[in-house]
Amino acid sequence: MNASRQIVILGSTGSVGSSTLDVIARYPERFKVVALTAHRQIEALFKQCIEFEPQYAAVGDARSAELLLARLRAAGSATQVLCGEQALEQVAALPQADTVMAAIVGIAGLRATFAAVQAGKRVLLANKEALVTAGPVFMNAVRSRGVTLIPIDSEHNAVFQALPGAFAGDLAAAGVRRILLTASGGPFRELPLERLSQVTPEEACAHPKWVMGRKISVDSATMMNKGLEIIEARWLFNAAEEQIKVVIHPESIIHSLVEYCDGSMLAQLGNPDMRTPIAFALGYPQRLEAGVDFLDLAALGQLNFSAPDHNRFPCLELARDALRASGSAPTVLNAANEVAVAAFLDSKLRFDQIPVLIGHVLAEIPVAQLRDLEDVFSVDRRARDCAGTWLARNAGVTVRRSLRVTA
């Protein structure tokens, strides 16, 4: 066995964070949890601290920190409690940690994930927004710091596994023609289009294959999740937009494929369980048993594939529009989507209005270049303000307009 890895988990109470701890618990001699973070899930974080005894726990606000600290001390725990966004950045860069699982959902996880990169940690990236909102800035930092970056999304992890071991960011040199990202199609793949306006948050969060948080579940239902993954793949694998394709695969057994110039396709298969990519990333380059059921291909019988219906899933094309526009457009896309999904989950926006709101904000915010994280957050704020104005008026344009580019 390798020497013990010292792990920080950003977002430990979410589905990815919990699955990470499940894998870590199987290898106490190999992994030591140094820090755990959550926003306000104090009960879950308390239980994790008691089981894994991290040196630090970080939460979102002072009141949550007080409650957690009182409970930990009453239980005899010596875990130190920190709070606020700066606390997330602090634990992400702890000198004693060598690996950071970045599993905070949304742009809220960007600064802490970037802090881990700046500190030269091995980064296991489950926070896709880091690349969607700040792709060029983030990857410049990864390269300059010599960081090992391993994707956790099942699709990108599958591509990572199917690429040559010596892949260094040049798809042509590796003989790669295309990357194919698979998508289940979510819960509304066959729902009559006229029913989409009546979809409830509960229906949208009932994913047929994966157990995920509410925001990601809605993104899967709109297929914005796949649109964000297209942008993420562009930065992870230095791929052109036209080299990244999406294919509907309802069984969620093939997690993605790499097509080579000789006509070969390499795919990574497995049951839909996030512990597989997590275990791969934690143990890389070795393989670890993850507690996942093994595939029975004969029992599966068949696997199905189809092209995505862009009338049903307009968010896919919105994401491609943003990627083609480049610069700040993906940042705007992500911000508008986060606002739209939150409004939908709060029953303030119909499901079929999510892409309408996103398209409106993309059309309204001019595209600019991103130089640093402050540019990213400035654009993010403008896009959220624009989305909020649209929501307040409860009306918006339904015809997509061209993205405006500034010099």
Image (spheres, rainbow, N blue to C red):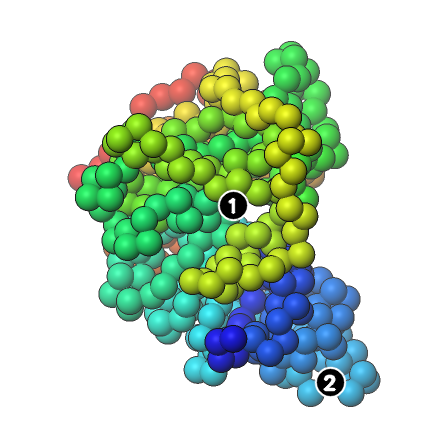
Query: Which of 49/69 is in front?
Result: 49
Name the residue at 48% across, 67% down.
Answer: 100
Q: Mark 2 sits on what residue?
A: 77
From this view, report whether residue 210 is shown above or below residue 393.
below
Distance between the Cα atoms at labels 1 and 2?
A: 35 Å
Circle 1 is placed at which residue position? 154
Mark 1 or 2 closer to N-term? 2
The answer to whether 215 appears left or right of 76 in the picture is: left
In the displayed structure image, the side of residue 294 where residue 368 appears, left or right: left
Res. 106 mark: none
Q: Name the residue at 26% across, 50% down.
A: 169
Please indicate, yes or no, whether residue 241 appears anywhere in the rendered image.
Answer: no
Q: Residues within 10 Å of mark 2 (few under 14, many from 20)?
A: some
* Furthest residue toward right: 74
Q: Is residue 283 left or right of residue 299?
A: left
In the rendered image, residue 51, in percent from the top left (x then y), is placed at 73, 75
* Horizontal side, residue 284 vs residue 8: left or right: left
Q: Residue at x 38, y 59 (%)?
A: 149
Q: Secondary structure at mark 1?
A: helix
Quarter of the image for residue 297 reads top right
